[in-house]
Image (cartoon, coloured by chain):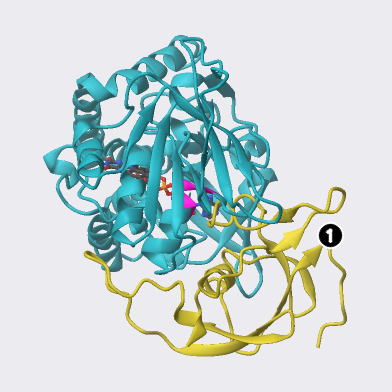
Chain colours: A yellow, B cyan
Amino acid sequence: MKALANRIQQHPILDFPEKKLVKFFFERKEIFGYEGEPIAAALVANGIKVFRYTEKLKRARGFFCAVGKCSSCLMMVDGKPNVMVCTEPLKSGMRVNRQFGRGKIRALK
Amino acid sequence: MIREEIVIVGAGPAGLWSAIVATKLGASVTIIDDNPIFGGQLIKQTHKFFGSKSHYCGIRGINIAKILTSDLENLPVKKFFNASVIGLYDNNLLAVLTQAKLIKLRAERIIFATGASENNIAFPNNDLPGVYGAGAVQTLMNVYGVRPGHRALMVGSGNIGLIVSYQMMQANIQVVAVLEIMPKIGGYHVHAAKLARLGVPILTCYTIKRALGIDMVEGAVIVKVNKRFKPIPGTEQRLKVDTICLAVGLSPLNELLWQAGCEMVYVPELGGQVAQHNEDMMTSRADIFVGGDLSGIEEASTAMLEGKIAGASAYESLKGVSAESKKIKEQAKVELGMIRQGPFGEKPRWGKERLAARRGWT
Ligand SMILES: Cc1cc2nc3c(=O)[nH]c(=O)nc-3n(C[C@H](O)[C@H](O)[C@H](O)COP(=O)(O)OP(=O)(O)OC[C@H]3O[C@@H](n4cnc5c(N)ncnc54)[C@H](O)[C@@H]3O)c2cc1C
């Protein structure tokens, strides 16, 4: 199961009980993550680090603070731009896309 | 719109204690935090805490968070999880963004205990994916069980840098080196010794020169510095890493205080811009109180004590002084004084004294 590649399996202090695995889409590709974890955690668990490209210099960006403060991790989620994926909980079937610049507002389904 | 007597923003050790104290004294309290669990920084601290006995020293941070939140469970406190306070408007109207909708809350008294955010430093490519705050890596590893990389460089050897490096090793992330620009390791000896036992080098008089990589970190160039912190040419070394962790200090998360119009003062020993406040943790606005890292970067035990004082003060300003509220505050002030007399309390003590010296009111 690819979603487990970067998951910590054994830890001297912490237990990470298996949670419900759900399917979602990254750049139209089907991948898996745990329901309710931040989208960013699910992406990183799948080895995905680049979340968006900046408007002017087209620089790659990933997460930085991981606690909803710095706005480095903005992505397109279900057609909505500028979603802070380090705090947004993952739901089954979500469509997550890299954001280019400020993103575009697509018709919400 | 919801009305409330006391609203507490932030549920770390400071905010949780404010809520416990103010509620037990008899005020009606709402506490708001933007995480799915309460506890602030504590929810990712797997190490045993330093500090005083009465403040859970020797207990792992994650367990301190559990103790505090279960204390709160039995009290009639209104709780908002996953909710961000995004603005403060006239007459103490707070805008709270929850998962479902925007809520308006009008508070008679507000206690801000929002903590701090991690600093960045300037070097080429410091914006690449793979350059992360040390606390961010800690959140992913210890709260969500995800490894953000496999080979890491840590910049900064204060307690946070040392502790997070050790925790990365526990999570099976190889820490290649810890860099410290000063000639001496910043954090406690116990934490440095644990890393040394694992064979992780702590390089003093070293800093990062640049991150390497196109779309993500593929390496780092480090360099030795002279006494004036200038890079010494010819001492550069390339390291193959996929993660660069920055543990280079914290700054108080003070935006809402600026919006509130609180008097702000720059005190480097406290981590930057803090709200001017008195010993009762009241700001220049009589209806706004502060506590914890927001009022000066310090530690969990002092955050809890300041939180208690802020909670009791907010209660008193609404309902008047009671024997109980007076006792809580007196005791907390004595304990704070004691902690700050210790060797590691020197910097914050000095910072708080500088702040007091500049206060034109009581
Ligand atoms: C790696 C590490 C190791 C440490 N080790 C120790 C130790 O051994 N001993 C010790 O005493 N201290 C230690 N500390 C320090 C200690 O954790 C902090 O000093 C303490 O947590 C500060 O408490 P606080 O309540 O002020 O803030 P925090 O714990 O940061 O809590 C603030 C909370 O407010 C929330 N918040 C912020 N803004 C908003 C908003 N607008 N709306 C809603 N919620 C918001 C935040 O998300 C957070 O949950 C350590 C810190 C770190 C990072």
Residue furthest to the front: B234
Q: Amino acid at mark 1?
A: Arg
What range of the chain is rendered magenta? B132-136
Looking at the rendered structure, the secondary structure element under dot 1 is: loop
In the image, residue B323 lies at what x, y percent?
Answer: 21, 38
Between B319 and A19, the residue placed more toward the observer is: A19
Question: In which image quadrant can residue B43 be found?
Answer: bottom left
**Is-magenta flag for residue B88?**
no
Q: Main secondary structure of the magenta part?
A: helix
Q: Is residue B211 visible?
A: yes
Q: Chain of mark 1?
A: A
Between A21 and B195, the residue placed more toward the observer is: B195
Q: Which residue is mark 1?
A: A102
Q: Residue at x 63, y 45 (%)?
A: B212
As drawn, is B32 to the left or to the right of B302?
right
Q: Is residue B138 above or below residue A29?
A: above
Q: Is residue B303 visible?
A: no
Q: Residue at x 55, y 63 (%)?
A: B83
The quarter of the rendered structure image containing the N terminus of chain B is bottom right
Question: In which image quadrant can residue B180 be found?
Answer: top left
Q: Residue at x 55, y 22 (%)?
A: B234
As drawn, is A94 to the left or to the right of B253?
right
Q: Is residue B258 above or below residue B356?
A: below
The quarter of the rendered structure image containing the C terminus of chain B is top left
In the image, residue B292 lies at what x, y percent?
Answer: 39, 38
Query: Within 10 angstroms of label 1, few (less than 14), some, or many (20 or more) residues?
Result: some
Q: Is residue B243 above or below residue B279?
A: below
